Image (cartoon, rainbow, N blue to C red):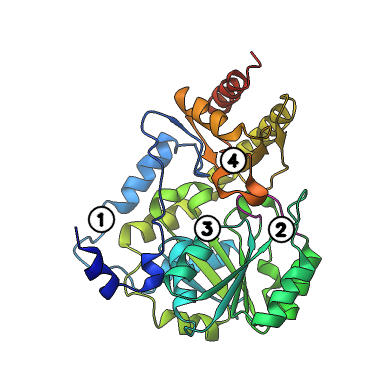
C-alpha cells in the first residue's frame, strides 16, 4: 500500500477526501437493488442476436462515431435533424465529459436527493457542487431555492433527473421550465427511466438553446452493455466530443444495442409488465402497517418504514435472501427510507413476503 505521505503529495485533495462508489454483492440473493430489467430475452431473439454478432471484427477498432447506432437512435426517438447524439459508456461517462469540459471555478447544481454520480464526479474534479433539498412530503423541486442558487452561483450545469432517482417522481413541468429559462448555463434533463414514465423533454429541445436530454439503455434492459446518450445542439456536443476518448463504445455494444433497439417491441412488452407489477407492489406496500410507499414513474419504489426501523428491515430482508437498497444512511429526506426495484412477479412476491415477515406481520 502506498504510504499516506506519498498519496497526499501526489493526489488532489478532492480525491483523497472522497469515498469510492460501492456496489453491493448480490451473489445468491434476489437482486432488487439496482433498477435493472429482470427479464431475459426469448430464445429466438438470442439466436438472431448471436447471428448478428458472429462476424463482429474483433481484431479491428470499433466505428469511433458509432454511426449506425446513432442513426437508429435518431430514428426511433424521432430526434429532429438539427440535433446530434453523443454516446457514452453509460450515462456516467456523459456526466463526466460534461463536467470535465467546465472551467475549474465552475458551479454545478442539482436537487437532493438525486443521482449520486452528479456529486461524485463534480467532487472528483474539484468543482463547486450545490445540492438543493427537495420539498418534504411530495419530493417536488423547491423552485425559490433553486432560483436563488442560480442567481447567486450562476451554475454552468444543472442536472434534473426526470423521473428522479431515488424518489421516483416526475417533477412539475412548469417548474422545470422556469429553471431552464432562469439560467445561462446548461440544463441536463436526465431521462434514465423514460421507458416507464411516458413523459419526456425530448420534444422540447427546439424551444430552449441551453437544454440537453440524456438517456441510457440500462434501465430498458441492457444494463450490461453500458450505453448512454446525450441529445442536443451539434455546437455543444461538438465541444464534448473533443474530450471523448476515441473508440469509447466497443463493437459488441454497438452491434448489440442496435439489434436490441430494432427489436423494440420486446422491450415494450417487458416495460408494460414492469409498470403493471409496479402498481401491484405499490398498492401492497401501502396496505402494510407501518409502511408508506411513494408513487413512482420509474421501475423502482421508494418506501418509508417506521422511525428507526429501516436498517433492521434491510438486514432482515437480506438475511431472507432479498437485496434492496438501504437509503437510511443518507439521512435527511431519506431517513428511514428503503428503495426496491420492481422485479418479476415471483421476485416481487418473495420481497413482499419477506418484508411482511421483517415487520412481524405474518
Dot 4 and dot 2 residues touching (CB under 8 Å):
no
- Residue 357 lies in what quarter of the image? top right
Label 3, label 2: how far apart the Cα atoms are: 15 Å
Left or right for 356, reference 243: right
**Residue highlighted by disc 2:** 134
Label 1, label 2: how far apart the Cα atoms are: 50 Å
- Mark nearer the N terminus (4 vs 2): 2
Name the mark on residue 55: 1
Label 4 neighbourhood size at 10 Å, few (<14), some (14-19), many (20+)? many
Residue at disc 1, secondary structure: loop
- Mark nearer the N terminus (1 vs 2): 1
Label 2 neighbourhood size at 10 Å, few (<14), some (14-19), many (20+)? many
- Mark nearer the N terminus (1 vs 3): 1
Identify whether 166 is placed above or below 255.
Answer: above
Using the image as rendered, state which of residue 86 and residue 56 is in the foreground: 86
Res 262 visible: no
Res 349 visible: yes
Residue occupying image coordinates x 43% and y 74%: 125
Q: Which x, y percent locates residue 102?
A: 49, 82
Name the mark on residue 116: 3
Residue at disc 3, secondary structure: helix
- Give, as a single range, the part of the protein colored magenta: 163-171
- Mark nearer the N terminus (3 vs 2): 3
Q: Which x, y percent locates residue 247?
A: 32, 71
**Residue highlighted by disc 4:** 339
Residue 166 forms part of the magenta stretch:
yes
Label 1 neighbourhood size at 10 Å, few (<14), some (14-19), many (20+)? few
Label 4, label 2: how far apart the Cα atoms are: 17 Å
Residue 341 forms part of the magenta stretch:
no
- Mark nearer the N terminus (4 vs 1): 1
Q: Which x, y percent locates residue 123?
A: 47, 69
Amino acid at each position: 500500500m502506498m504510504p499516506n505521505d506519498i498519496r497526499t503529495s501526489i493526489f488532489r485533495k478532492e480525491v483523497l477526501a472522497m469515498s469510492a462508489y460501492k456496489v453491493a454483492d448480490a451473489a445468491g440473493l434476489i437482486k432488487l437493488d439496482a433498477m435493472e430489467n429482470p427479464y431475459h430475452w426469448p430464445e429466438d431473439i438470442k439466436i438472431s442476436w448471436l447471428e448478428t454478432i458472429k462476424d463482429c471484427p474483433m481484431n479491428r477498432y470499433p466505428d469511433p462515431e458509432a454511426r449506425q447506432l446513432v442513426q437508429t437512435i435518431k430514428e426511433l426517438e424521432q430526434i429532429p435533424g438539427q440535433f446530434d447524439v453523443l454516446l457514452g459508456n453509460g450515462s456516467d461517462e456523459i456526466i463526466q465529459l460534461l463536467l470535465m469540459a467546465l472551467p475549474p471555478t465552475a458551479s454545478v447544481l442539482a436537487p437532493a436527493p438525486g443521482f449520486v454520480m452528479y456529486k461524485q464526479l463534480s467532487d472528483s474534479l474539484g468543482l463547486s457542487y450545490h445540492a438543493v433539498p427537495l420539498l418534504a412530503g411530495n419530493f417536488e423541486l423547491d423552485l425559490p431555492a433553486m432560483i436563488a442558487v442560480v442567481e447567486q452561483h450562476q451554475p454552468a450545469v444543472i442536472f434534473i433527473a426526470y423521473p428522479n432517482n431515488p424518489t421516483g417522481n416526475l417533477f412539475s413541468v412548469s417548474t422545470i421550465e422556469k429553471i431552464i429559462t432562469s439560467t445561462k448555463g446548461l440544463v441536463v434533463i436526465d431521462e434514465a427511466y423514460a421507458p416507464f414514465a411516458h413523459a419526456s423533454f425530448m420534444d422540447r429541445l427546439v424551444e430552449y438553446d441551453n437544454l440537453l436530454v440524456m438517456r441510457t439503455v440500462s434501465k430498458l434492459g441492457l444494463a450490461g452493455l453500458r450505453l448512454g446518450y446525450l441529445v442536443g445542439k451539434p455546437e455543444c456536443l461538438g465541444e464534448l466530443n473533443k474530450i471523448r476518448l476515441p473508440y469509447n463504445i466497443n463493437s459488441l455494444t454497438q452491434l448489440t444495442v442496435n439489434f436490441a433497439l430494432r427489436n423494440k417491441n420486446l422491450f415494450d412488452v417487458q416495460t408494460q409488465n414492469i409498470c403493471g407489477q409496479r402498481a401491484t407492489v405499490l398498492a401492497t406496500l401501502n396496505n402494510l402497517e407501518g409502511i408508506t410507499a411513494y408513487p413512482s414513474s420509474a421501475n423502482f419504489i421508494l418506501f418509508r418504514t417506521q422511525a428507526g426501523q429501516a436498517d433492521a428491515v434491510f438486514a432482515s430482508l437480506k438475511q431472507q435472501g432479498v437485496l434492496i437498497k438501504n437509503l437510511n444512511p443518507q439521512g435527511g429526506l431519506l431517513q428511514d427510507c428503503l428503495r426496491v426495484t420492481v422485479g418479476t412477479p415471483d421476485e416481487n412476491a418473495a420481497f413482499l413476503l419477506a418484508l411482511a415477515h421483517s415487520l412481524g406481520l405474518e
